[in-house]
Amino acid sequence: MIAIERKFNAYLDQVKLITVLLPYSYFEGTSNEFRLKGEGVNLPLAIQEKVFLEHAVKYICFSSVRPEIGKSYSVTDEHGGETDLQIGAVIRTDEFDEEYFYGGEDLGASYSQGKTIFKLWAPTAAKVKLKLFQSSEASHELISMKRLDKGVWSIEVDRDLELYRYSFLLCINLEWREAVDPYATALTVNGEYGVVIDPAKTKTSIAESPSLENPVDAIIYEVHIRDLMSHPNSGATRKGTYLGGAERGTKSAKGIETGLSYIKSLGITHVEFLPFHDFEGVDELDRHSTYNWGYNPVHYNTPDGSYATDPEDPYNRIQELKQLITAVHREGLGVIMDVVYNHVYIRETSPFEKIVPGYYFRHNEHGLPSNGTGVGNDIASERLMARKYIIDSVLYWLKEYHLDGFRFDLMGILDVETMNAVRKAVDTVNRNILIIGEGWDLNTPLPPDQKANIANQAKLPDIGQFNDWFRDSIKGSTFNIYDKGYAIGNERYLEAAKQVMAGSIGIAKRKNGLFLQPVQSVNYIESHDNHTLWDKLKICSPDHDEAILKKQHRLATAMVLLAQGIPFLHSGQEFFRTKNGVGNSYRSPDEINWLDWDLRDDNLENVEYIKGLIGIRVGNKAFRLPDSEKIREQMSFLPLPAPLIGLKLMSPGEGDWEKIIVLINPSMEQKLADFTEHARWNILADNEKASPKPFRHIEGDKVLLEPCSLLVAAI
């Protein structure tokens, strides 16, 4: 195809609406007529409106015929000038979505020993070719693909293509572009090409996943694969890799267990791994030279090679990730995958933009890409094929890698219908799968009532949301490091602290909460983002003795574990994890990000305390009430003076205790608290120890609370 020199431009912006832009440098931007030519058509366009822009005149024209997308047309003007009709904003119309939606489950490369079928959805392309080669790109072959219905292109290659490299070449708007298959399940090193693999060669033995009666039974522990075992004293041989994370029997310098067996010993139910789909930011051939959290997604359906022992072998990363997941399952733990469907690393170079330009990303009222994510692009999840891609990808990971949950990064960018469709699709496979996400309200062109954010939680009943109200009430504002929360002695957060301890569903004086049900509340005070709690404490209370800071840290973490809802811990939180004051360590070196097992060994007393609190939660359903009605029935507040909080939990009918009292004193002074009744109280936790079994008793109706501490008593 020969490109036409464009002195002006014409775009198909709706199915019968053509926008022509004439620059002032071209006949002063004037033309009294335009014609549409091509595919047996030679018809005048009706000029409906003329808009004077800074550098050009925009003519909005109506066509009496509907140009067929994927075929070639040109537009001429009264001066004899001619330009090709480019695909414009029509791809973002409902008509386009409805006409070209493809519901098949066979996009990508479908391999068998005798043949491989390639299918690609590219409705705006005029031509598509498959680029195919074994090892040397110089010897590649190009095979023309056939256009089918719904804008799908297909080719069947009748020979064994195992380990062949491939990409697609597309001619769109008279320009050729090359793209990796967005449905590729295997890649060459650093994701340059897709690779055809035999899925049968990646199968592994399946260890049984944990089963939960209710999502509030989960206790989530967030880990970065590289951080987990990179430390010199992690005891792992293959540090910073999938296999390093999977190693068993690892021990620290003091001979204390590390890795997955240590996490299991805490009482955790689910390990949430930061993104492990293919991402930019780490050279897979030189992974030690740079570090990245993984929130730079490039290819969504393939594991990243920077955690593999041999990233040049397309099978290696797949097999080793599956070994890690199996190792987690063998510890009786679930695996939650952190997924980043809200944006791509670079829009212009992503397969989505190269294959169907302008379709997969949101645009603002000026036609420019929106930036609610803050990284230059927002995935348009509301478009049918973008929604289908997200659902297909989630189901692929779920079925192929036997995952137990998904954490949606910046979920507020996505739309409600897509997230509910994901939930519905996942439920057809396993209703036990956890789905949680960051429901922040972000500035994207999606209508407010369609955003999958906390404000619309009533429309997302079975999806957990990270509770920033909990986070900021207990530790203080994340975005004002000097703001202190309730657990750090700020009485101003007292009433908010009560509400978030009750699952943020609205209790006592507050009839309406942040959420309808406790399963929607993911309670946390620190994660990979922002400062660790320890670093915040060091910065906002520089004059405090470390012993006091540790008490405050312990109290805040205890409130996460004893609140209604789903508790979430950042790895190392139980031993005062620090990043040396770095508030955004997404590309800081290993020395800042790794789990410091020496620090763990120095803080075993606190580790045991947190382990004891987890045991209390697991052993008593009163801390895991499954719905808001039961919380309102079985949980109440004791009439204690500020800043104390007293929670009374009645037994839901199971467990050893008829009644549990939780007393919290965030102040720096001893406080006398009233149990409100005289009894022989069994102590499960105090300022020094926590255990699911009582370790001492208190006789009477009052107790003296130590500074910055809690007490859990039961009868």
Image: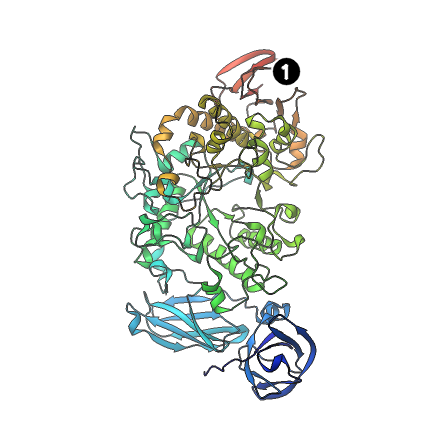
Asked if residue 576 is positioned above or below residue 710 in the image, the reply reads below
Q: Residue at x 62, y 22 (%)?
A: 643
Q: Nearer the viewer, residue 35 or 675?
A: 35
Q: Is residue 211 left or right of residue 677?
A: left
Residue 415 image point, x, y percent: 60, 55
**Left-right relation of 249 to 21:** left
State left or right for residue 369 relative to residue 286: right
Residue 306 seen by the camera: yes
Q: Residues within 10 Å of mark 1 (few under 14, many from 20)?
A: some
Image quadrant containing the N terminus: bottom left
Q: Residue furthest top?
A: 699
Q: What scheme was used to colour the molecule?
A: rainbow
Using the image, determine if residue 699 lies above or below residue 463: above
Dot 1 falls on a residue whose secondary structure is: strand
- Between 175 and 572, the one nearer to me in the picture: 175
- x then y, percent, for residue 583: 47, 40
Quadrant of residue 606 within the rendered picture: top left
Amino acid type at circle 1 is Asp
Q: Which residue is mark 1?
A: 674
